[in-house]
Image (spheres, rainbow, N blue to C red):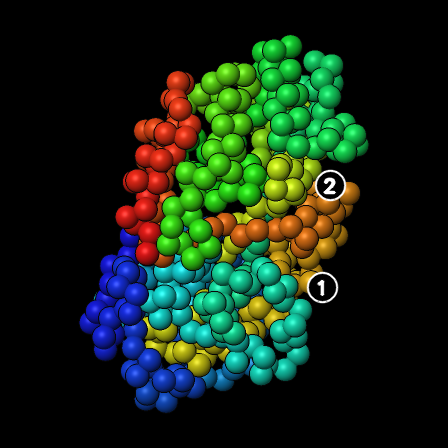
Amino acid sequence: MLITMAACSSGGSSSGSAGPTTSSSDKGAGSSASSDGSKVELHMTVWTADPGALAMFDEIGKAFVKQEPAVSAVKFDSITLDQLDTVITTGIQAGDPPDLSWLPVEKSLEYIKNDALVNLEPALKATDGYDFGDLIPQLQEHWTGGGDALYGVPFSTGALALAYNEDLYKKAGVKSPADLIAEGNWTWDSFREISKELHDKSGVTGFVLNDFDYANWTRLLPILFAYGASPWNDDATKCTADTAEFDSAMQLYHDMVYVDGSAPLPGQKVDFWGGQAGATTAFLGSMSALADATFKYNVVPTPSGPAGDAQALGQASIVVLAAGKHQKLATEFAAFLTNKKNAETMATRYPPTRKSLLTAKILAGNSGVLTESMVQPIVDATTKTGRIFPVAVDDAKVADALNRSLDKYVWQKDVNMADALKNVCSDVQPLLK
């Protein structure tokens, strides 16, 4: 959780929430070089250690340096995601925060409400050839602050898709997800049925949520969204985990675990990628694990529910920190990094939010795992029914409380779901602001 940096603000955060703050009066528009006229070195935090990705960003940084004489270098500082708040907060305390950063959508509301980010929209619209209108509006919504601003440019908007082991379904003589799609019966209820049938006939786990382990509630979002459910309302002020929609969604997965036996129990380890389960939901980027698969597989959009089709999307943006020493140059680099040419380069690794680049051909790329025919329905779902993860002001604390409360009240064999979810809201509501 971030701490409020009152020393860096003339009056603290008007929202009263925790988070980094900065006063607009002491930053201005930034400068084109350091105060002594020397060139400046821009720093950007990223949470990847992938040599290929870092080399890609380094090349883009070098290209920017060639065209911007006031910048001597752009350094990409690799950290882990759980270090992000600490790195930014300690940097502000020391008077030397990063100039730019990746920021997960879960942090967007917190940082925006604490005036910690620079509004990039005027600069992006003024940049020759940027084509601001190419950005898909609904995929930028969490970064607008509820107005006409844009406090971050999404560079990675990943869909949670469903991968399944074709061999297991065929061997058991059970309809596969593709069969249900062909029948026009691709719903969570019908998927539950074939998952149970697969488990009953073969003994294997029917469905496992990737990266869930009963400690990451966001992996339930494909089910929740399909039922029209979310743990809180749009402005993150009221817990809605006790609604009928949330109840129905949670009951479906709870029954798969405790009634059908088709999904793992808490503490039970099941490796879909190793052939131990019929299906999983995971980000498209995680599908690279299928490169070593010893079974035939397919990737499809997640099922629909009572609320219709709903594509759950995770997201991260490139932001400029308001506490940074070189706002103007950092903003120029943000515009350069996310322009059409460089966005296309990044799209080989990170799903884009530009209309011109969000295509099956670009997302499938040369992965050797995904095909255009697999990816096209997911692209269509992203643009038509895509929903970004819900966010709260103090997201880390709220998410921790939600995960702990679900573990205490919901992830037990014999529960009354309505009563359990009322208890969940009792735990979560005091943290919503």
Using the rendered view, name the quadrant where residue 129 is placed.
Answer: bottom right
Residue 257 lies, in percent from the top left, at: 49, 21
Distance (Cα) linking label 1 and label 2: 19 Å
Position of the C terminus, as image quadrant, is bottom left
Question: Mark 2 = which residue?
Answer: 374
Q: Report whether residue 56 is seen.
A: no
Residue reaching furthest to the left: 7
Amino acid under disc 1: Ser
Circle on res. 20: none
In the displayed structure, 128 sits above or below 149; it is below
Amino acid under disc 2: Met
What residue is rendered at 24% in x and 59% in y?
Answer: 3
What residue is rendered at 48% in x and 36% in y?
Answer: 244
In the displayed structure, 186 sits above or below 39; it is above
Badge 1 local density, few (<14 within 10 Å), some, or many (20+)? few
In the displayed structure, 49 sits above or below 403; it is below
Q: Nearer the viewer, residue 90 or 189?
A: 189
Question: Mark 1 = which residue?
Answer: 356
Q: Are marks 1 and 2 in contact (CB under 8 Å)?
A: no
Residue 238 lies, in percent from the top left, at: 38, 50
Q: Secondary structure at mark 2?
A: helix
Q: Report whether residue 184 is seen.
A: yes
Residue 171 lies, in percent from the top left, at: 72, 14
Q: Secondary structure at mark 1?
A: loop
What residue is rendered at 75% in x and 52% in y?
Answer: 361
Q: Nearer the viewer, residue 286 or 70?
A: 286
What residue is rendered at 42% in x and 74% in y?
Answer: 118
